Amino acid sequence: MELRLLRYFEAVAEELHLARAADRLGIDQSPLSRAMRDLEQALGVALFDRSSRQTRLTWAGQVLLVECRRVLATLDQAIQATKSAAQGYQSHLRIAICDSLAQPRIATLLARSREDEPELEIRVFELPFSQQLRGLHTDLLDVGFALSGTVSDGVVAESVWTDPLSVIVPARHPLLAHKEVKLADALKFPLVLCHPDAASGCHDQIQAMLDGTALPLKVVDHVTSLGVMLTLVGAGYGIGFAIASQVQALSRPDIAMRPLAGMPVLSTYLLRRQGEPSEPLKRFIGRVKRLGPPPTGAPSA
């Protein structure tokens, strides 16, 4: 099977709109439609449900999309590894981070790795927690950073640092009258919380904190990314919880934050496959463990 067909299928399956997929691929809509029919004929299955007004993936199509992404990712990594070897890199690490992590820490870690081992190529991917687990199992990743340690067999999760948790509110909000906010006061307002399948995996940690209060919650929405949470908070839908240094790095004028009283924290976990790590990975893990406190800054007013 031509790899071209798999790349075409990935675009159509993600866009679920032939014209948008064709524009994304830089080809005409007619040959793209023909290619999808050829692919279905070659496989002997229907990949798309065209019976409704909106194109949807069949179950077979959903399975192919997962496998297609894996095959294409493997191919892209092989190409990148070959090019890196030609440029003089001796080895590489493939690292994934979630979107809610404190980026200053990650930046410091990567900078130290470049200084210590300039011959080591580090490739960084932003991936949801669930995709990090799949990438580790299929050897598409060497290490992941996420806010959940709930892993499956074959993967090790180790808490490597903690960050203070802050309450995130609209730029003008009654809670800003406090230098720090008691959790009981925060829970008087509607909440925008992480979805159980959120990109970072932070749901379990925050939910455990909320369950410990035994107070009623008014949850207006569950979101799958930090960006969506901040957008809804900025629009006044409710308040949220996040790592302060990550929110500060985004410099959004529509939101503000205050530390939570009692200094509750979120733990960041390093994820890797079970077994003896490679020498480059051992040295990288050593840098993670030696990493100092994150840069500090005053909370937004």
Image (cartoon, rainbow, N blue to C red):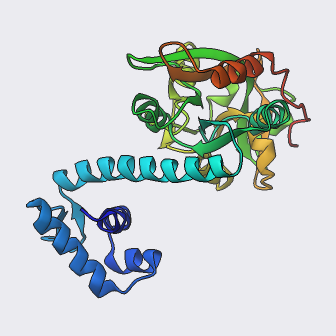
Q: Quadrant of residue 165?
A: top right
Residue at (57, 29) in percent of width and height = 143
Residue 131 rendering spot, x and y as whole percentages: 45, 38
76 vs 92, left or right, is: left
* Vertical order, 261 against 110 (above or below): above
73 vs 161, left or right, is: left
Quadrant in which the N terminus appears: bottom left
Residue 227 visible to an observer of this rendering:
yes
Is 222 in front, or is 9? 9
* Vertical order, 171 against 204 (above or below): below
Residue 25 rendering spot, x and y as whole percentages: 44, 75
Residue at (50, 40) in percent of width and height = 128
Residue 254 rendering spot, x and y as whole percentages: 76, 55
Residue at (33, 84) in percent of width and height = 29
Looking at the image, how many numbered discs can be counted on the residues? 0
Residue 230 visible to an observer of this rendering:
no
Q: In which quarter of the image is residue 12?
A: bottom left
Residue 229 rendering spot, x and y as whole percentages: 60, 46
* Vertical order, 145 against 76 (above or below): above
Q: Which residue lies furthest to the left in this view?
A: 44
Q: In which quarter of the image is residue 179?
A: top right
Is 115 in front, or is 287? 115
* Vertical order, 248 against 68 (above or below): above
Quadrant in which the C terminus appears: top right
